[in-house]
Amino acid sequence: MVYKLSSVLFGHSLDVRSLATTEDGRIISTSRDKTAKVWMPNGFNSGYNEIATLHSHTSFVSCVCVLPPSPQHPNGLILTGGCDKKICAFHPTLFDPLFILEDHKDNVCSLNAGIQPGFVLSSSWDKSAKLWHVGDQRCVLTLTGHELTVWSVLQMANGTIVTGSADKTIRVYSPDGTYLRTLTGHKDCVRSLAAQSAVELLSCANDATIRKWNVDTGENLEVFFGHKHYIYTLVASGGLMVSGGEDRTVRVWTGKVSEEILLPVQSVWAVARLPNGDIVTGTNDGVVRVFSADPARHADQATLASFQDDITNFGKADEQEIGGVKVSDLPGPEALYEPGRTDGQTKMVREGAKVVCYAWSAASGEWNKIGDVLGAQAAAGKTLYNGKEYDFVFSVDIEDGKPPLKLPYNRGDDPWLA
């Protein structure tokens, strides 16, 4: 089974952070541009049309899920969670904003439908997960116990609720919220969870592994190796497991063997599967891509060739250096989720083949883009800037027609916080 590019969906202006799909083949994407978008198959050429943009959040939109029909909402719901601590509900075909669920104290980073109609689970940077009854628009259960961000939450088919956290553990709860056990084995943040059966759970982590667990016994059944860097996203359906991460790849697993799909990006934030088996990706370049194993849905040869050129060119750019700092060693846009320490603090962030400088605004609580980092003045010795000596002084392009700003930097400094 060989997956090739099928469609490319442009519309978001910043990272695509999460994805969901519907039974009729629609794709819902969310982004750091504060929006969610709904894409409908156009019926020909395996393409998609953007049919709606959902506006309700005041900050990054981190997650999305589609809720099946329930007595109170017979058409189902689209739910999105964001950095503004809110969960926003929308009509799935009219796209009207219906209501907002509020109880989390920080970024809502994961949403998944419960096994009972009208219930949804959420998790947050506030170290908790919650179960909501959307008909009553209230939180009915709060799960605590993790020491750090709860990156993922889901409910198994038998009703068991599981949470994965930045504290490297997975906690297991009964349907009524009673703590049962902790699953340990990952060496870094647990980022995503997926159910493979009623009792078998898959987890991926920043330790570049995927693990399979029996949630009833706590046994670690298997460990999957293949990714070279953080794994952010994981789905399991139709006998396949699909994962994506910081190594520029999506991997499609059949047993312990994986097929690698290389992308012209650094970060694969989200993967999803469509009812026809196609794979959807959301990445740090703001693009949604669809890959298919069906030759009838492959893109034309010109598009495939252009895509391969993009991959080649991105690989070359990834090896470049700016002022002695390797571009690939800089943080991606995920670094902008961490609040700044002081007003005016600057941070260099890798965005595709570019390096962008951001400054922290204490007043707005956001990282604001200053401009693109162009290069650095360097000499055999030090460079004098504002009465101090530095190894490099970067130029930051803030606006056409205006002189660049200067960003001083010493070897040994944290390039995240220049």
Image (cartoon, rainbow, N blue to C red):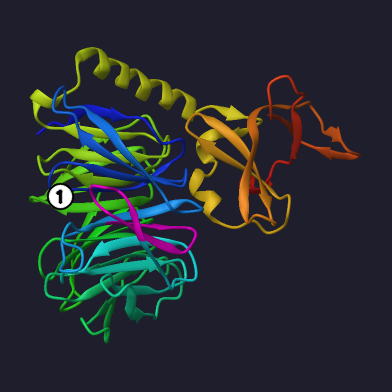
Q: Is residue 95 magenta-colored?
A: yes
Asked if 218 appears above or below 264 in the picture, the reply is below
**Magenta stretch in the rendered image:** 78-98
Residue furthest top in the image: 302
Q: Residue at x 60, y 58 (%)?
A: 339
Residue 363 placed where, x, y %?
Answer: 70, 56
* Residue 263 seen from this side: yes
Could you tell me which residue is drawn at 32 percent across and 40 percent down?
52
Q: Helix, strand, or loop for circle 1?
A: loop
Instruction: Using residue 52 as the reference point, say whether residue 313 is left or right of it.
Output: right
Q: Is residue 60 left or right of residue 345?
A: left
Residue that sits furthest to the bottom in the current view: 178
Q: Is residue 272 above or below residue 79?
A: above
Residue underneath mark 1: 256
From the top left corner, tell me how far across and down residue 10 is, in percent: 36, 30
Please say whether residue 228 is visible from this viewpoint: no
